[in-house]
Amino acid sequence: MDPASFAVIIVELAHAQQVVKYLTVASIVLVVR
């Protein structure tokens, strides 16, 4: 695996974690409200 595709995978994972975090916060806000 070349470093470029490895970097892309890292960025994709980080982006996915941000999406999960955003969804978690959104669901918490909906439940609290």
Image (tube, rainbow, N blue to C red):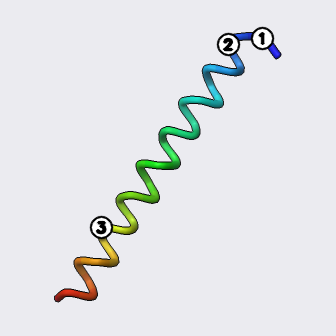
Residue linked to disc 2:
4
Mark 1 to mark 3 CA distance (whole Å): 35 Å
Displayed quadrant of residue 32: bottom left
Q: Is residue 13 shown left or right of residue 3?
A: left
Residue linked to disc 3:
25
Of callouts 1 and 3, the N-terminal one: 1
- Picture coordinates of residue 29, whole percent (x, y): 23, 77
Q: What amino acid type should be assigned to the residue bearing mark 3?
A: Val
Residue at 30% across, 67% down:
25
Residue at 35% across, 59% down:
22
Q: Which SS class for mark 1?
A: loop
Q: Are marks 2 and 1 in contact (CB under 8 Å)?
A: yes
Residue linked to disc 1:
2
Q: Residues within 10 Å of mark 3 (few under 14, many from 20)?
A: few
Q: Is residue 7 shown left or right of residue 14?
A: right
Q: Quadrant of the C terminus?
A: bottom left
Q: Is residue 10 shown left or right of residue 4?
A: left
Q: Which SS class for mark 2?
A: helix
Of callouts 3 and 2, the N-terminal one: 2
Q: Is residue 7 shown left or right of residue 32?
A: right
